[in-house]
Amino acid sequence: MSGKFVAYVGSYSYTGKAKGITIYDVDTQKGCFVKKDEVDVDNSSYVIKSRNQKTLYSIADEGIVSFRILPDGGLERLNSVKINGMRGCHLSTDINDKFIFVSGYHDGKITVLKLHPDGRVGKIVDEVYHKGLGSIAERNFRPHVSCTRTTPDGHFVMAADLGIDQVKIYHFDNNDERLALVDMIPCDINSAPRFFEFSKDGKFLYLMYEMKNVVDVFTYEAKPGCRMPVVEKIQTVPTTGHNKLSELTAATTLTLNADEKFLFTTNAGDNSVCLYERDAETGLLKEKMCLPISGDYPKDVAIFPDNQHIASINHESGSITFFKIDYSTGLIVMCANIVKVNQPNCCVIVEV
């Protein structure tokens, strides 16, 4: 790999043991992170890079914080904006970096804010509260929006709500800048749809359920001028592979690698990572392995730019563990020393 890469890891800072965002140089040959710097953010629970990779956005107690990514990987604070609600849990931008969407776990709200050309966060243009009741489970009796994204065609916004077991589909028009509910994907009671990603070609949707511990694969099609997209389920696979599922196991995240030939899922409780081979034509998944991740509560997994290494972001054990992947055999081997970081939540790798 000829380029230089840095990793940004968001952590809770309320204990005083972390500033919020830790910056690491990424060693793509050894498959590890080397600490570079720390930046103050109050309880950075989620970080993302802009589509053009020039700006980093973080959830913070005050709302959203934006940073310019400097040539050496350092961060220069641009601004922070309140979101008129409780702190968010997930961020995403639209396909043109014109809007940023905040998912509200605690208040069940989607907040849409404008983005300025220089990366600064602008004003709120729309906010929608989900309504309804979920199951009788203590955690899932009211709305909890956990993931919001624009669809690849740019015409719709989808929001997973693990409290009321639904994925809502909104039409979003860049002209009137309003979310208009057009459809929803009903999910099994107490399944807790938590996180999803689309394939780059826009043909497939991968939806992960926290409590049901499965990934549903859907086809996705939005014809020009249509009022709503057509979404059809074609496969369900367990996030834990063939491992026996414990009642204490919860799926935490999923991610596609750069060429989208493979999909990773992670699980808290049994503390594992599962690897699936993906068929680009059919979108279907085939299990390759499910193995321990050597840390407690793997809340996120970062795939290295070489596609040959992964970093597991282990929230409960306060650690990052590194593995080299053998895709042919479906094995991972620890390849570097554990890095300690206080209560890490997520990681994003950026080329600088």
Image: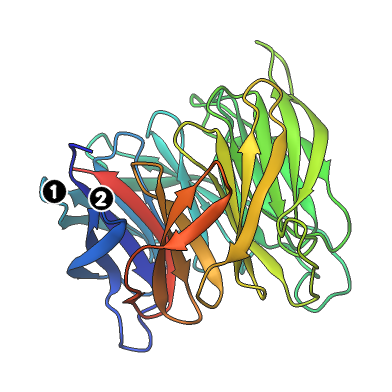
Q: Is residue 183 left or right of residue 170?
A: right
Q: Which mark is residue 335?
A: none
Q: Amino acid at mark 2?
A: Gln
Q: Residue at x 37, y 66 (%)?
A: 10
Packing grade of label 1 (10 A; few <14, some 14-19, many >=20) is few
Q: Amino acid at mark 1?
A: Leu
Q: Position of residue 349 (x, y in %)?
A: 32, 50
Q: Nearer the viewer, residue 315 or 309?
A: 309
Q: Residue at x 82, y 34 (%)?
A: 233
The quarter holding residue 38 reads bottom left
In the displayed orientation, state which residue is furthest to the front. 329
Q: Nearer the viewer, residue 312 or 152?
A: 312
| Disc 2/disc 1 C-alpha distance (Å) | 23 Å
Q: Which mark is residue 70?
A: 1
Q: Residue at x 36, y 35 (%)?
A: 51
Residue 267 visible (yes or no): yes
Q: Is residue 319 above or below residue 189?
A: below
Q: Secondary structure at mark 1?
A: loop
Q: Secondary structure at mark 2?
A: loop
